[in-house]
């Protein structure tokens, strides 16, 4: 099957990572990708695998005549059997231009759950409202990566009968425990083996609520006397971020946190941690880092945002969002869990088993393939 993917951009994000994993792992179908904006690091990775990627270079939240014409011509030239769009702007623009190009077999993708007016741009909220109105006629199906996404978007006017949940999938051969990385990275970061190591892989963004994490660390410092430390990984999680440094200083935990910035060796990082924390306040659909950590046998402490609790199940700790005391309580409980070595090993094993059984990359690919096949066979209207 010839599949054309249209995504808004290739910046650092969950949808971009899933698309990259998908097209590089699926050898059954023929994939091509169009980014409305940039080609980015993920686009470069896809290109390296011999898959065609096109960047229209349209400015953020803006459409250009040249970009739309190029998109129209590419759809006509590629002549795909199915068009899979991945984010709000690509859902909207991609399906309209596809219809003009004579292509009606379009599947939308939803990878978000929160559209708080205080935290979401006016243009994005306008696009979402428009998509809700157009969802009756334009897409054949609407894929959400999370149960929460279905609930939220049905309230926004999306056609619920068209919505299908396909959770994100992970390559468990890539995301796997790396025992050697634990000692190597801890030595590099100058963190002793007897120190409990927390970590959070998340870009600097209000959605991730690093202020909540830092406040929890301040609370944990008051409660727990045994040695612990926290590393943070992601864009703008570095010494160059003065706002972040000020937060750490005010909380009195700068000596307990190492800022590592962007890293590409995430399986190694996860293997070096005792626990991964995700302190998000809103907007998560199906957070990749939680599943990636668990696939590496690293238990997680998460806030109850999006499908985080669904991913973790009974293998970790789930706390309310924006509750640093609750988050610190869970982190303290995790430290205590380290003393029970048989129990800890059982928890670690169950983490990986849960991802392997429920969120395997091949399972996700097969579910998309089945959905696409049903759309292609469905009579056009």
Image (tube, rainbow, N blue to C red):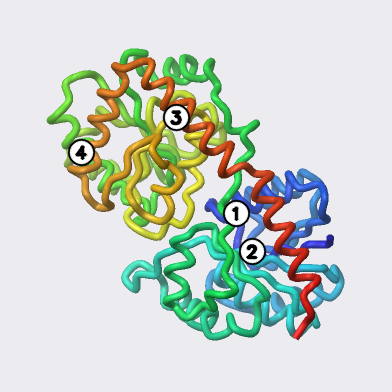
In this rendering, the count of numbered labels is: 4
Front disc: 3 or 1: 3
Residue 193's spot in the image, x, y percent? Answer: 37, 13
Residue at which label 1 appears = 16
Instruction: Check disc 1 and report its element: helix, strand or loop.
Output: helix
- Could you say which disc has been placed on residue 249 in the image? 4
Tell me how far mark 4 sits from mark 1, CA to CA. Answer: 34 Å
In which quadrant of the rendered view does residue 25 lie?
Answer: top right
Asked if residue 11 shows in the view, the reply is: no
Instruction: Check disc 3 and report its element: helix, strand or loop.
Output: loop
Disc with the residue nearer the chain's start (3 vs 4): 4
Packing grade of label 4 (10 A; few <14, some 14-19, many >=20) is few
Tell me how far mark 2 sits from mark 4, CA to CA. Answer: 39 Å
Left or right: 201 in relation to 370: left
Packing grade of label 2 (10 A; few <14, some 14-19, many >=20) is many
Front disc: 4 or 1: 1
* Position of the N terminus by quadrant: bottom right
**Depth check, front residue: 93 or 148:** 148
Front disc: 2 or 4: 2
Disc with the residue nearer the chain's start (3 vs 1): 1
Residue 177's spot in the image, x, y percent? Answer: 54, 24
Instruction: Check disc 4 and report its element: helix, strand or loop.
Output: helix
Front disc: 2 or 3: 3
Residue 226's spot in the image, x, y percent? Answer: 21, 19
Instruction: Look at the picture and state if 143 lies above or below 256.
Output: below
- Could you say which disc has been placed on residue 7 in the image? 2
Residue at which label 3 appears = 298
Residue 289's spot in the image, x, y percent? Answer: 48, 42
Packing grade of label 3 (10 A; few <14, some 14-19, many >=20) is many
Task: Please say if the residues under marks 1 and 2 sit with CB atoms less than 8 Å apart.
Answer: yes
**Depth check, front residue: 112 or 205:** 112
């Amino acid at each position: 099957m010839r599949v054309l993917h249209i995504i808004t951009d290739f910046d650092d994000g969950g949808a971009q990572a899933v698309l990259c994993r998908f097209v590089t792992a699926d050898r059954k179908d023929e994939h091509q990708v169009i980014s409305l904006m940039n080609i980015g690091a993920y686009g470069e990775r896809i290109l390296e695998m011999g898959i065609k990627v096109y960047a229209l270079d349209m400015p953020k939240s803006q459409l250009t005549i040249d970009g739309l014409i190029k998109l129209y011509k590419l759809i006509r030239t590629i002549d795909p059997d199915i068009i899979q769009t991945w984010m709000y702007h690509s859902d909207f623009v991609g399906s309209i231009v596809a219809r003009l190009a004579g292509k009606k077999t379009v599947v939308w993708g939803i990878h978000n759950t929160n559209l708080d007016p205080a935290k979401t741009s006016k243009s994005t909220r306008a696009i979402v409202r428009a998509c809700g109105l157009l969802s009756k006629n334009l897409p054949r199906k609407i894929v959400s990566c999370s149960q929460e996404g279905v609930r939220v978007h049905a309230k926004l006017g999306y056609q619920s009968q068209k919505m299908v949940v396909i959770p994100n999938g992970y390559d468990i051969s890539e995301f796997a425990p790396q025992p050697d990385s634990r000692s190597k990275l801890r030595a590099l970061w100058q963190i002793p083996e007897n120190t409990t190591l927390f970590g959070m892989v998340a870009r600097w963004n209000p959605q991730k609520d690093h202020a909540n994490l830092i406040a929890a660390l301040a609370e944990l410092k008051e409660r727990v006397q045994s040695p612990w430390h926290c590393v943070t990984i992601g864009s703008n999680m570095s010494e160059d971020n003065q706002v972040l440094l000020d937060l750490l200083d005010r909380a009195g935990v700068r000596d307990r946190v190492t800022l590592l910035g962007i890293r590409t060796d995430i399986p190694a990082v996860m293997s070096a941690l005792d626990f991964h924390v995700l302190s998000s306040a809103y907007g998560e659909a199906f957070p990749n880092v939680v599943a990636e950590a668990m696939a590496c046998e690293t238990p997680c402490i998460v806030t109850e945002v999006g499908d985080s609790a669904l991913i973790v199940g009974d293998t970790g700790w789930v706390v309310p969002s924006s509750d640093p005391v609750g988050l610190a309580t869970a982190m303290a409980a995790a430290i205590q869990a380290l003393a029970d070595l048989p129990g800890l090993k059982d928890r670690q094993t169950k983490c990986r088993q849960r991802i392997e059984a429920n969120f395997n990359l091949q399972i996700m690919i097969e579910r998309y393939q089945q959905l696409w096949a049903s759309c292609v066979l469905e009579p056009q209207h």
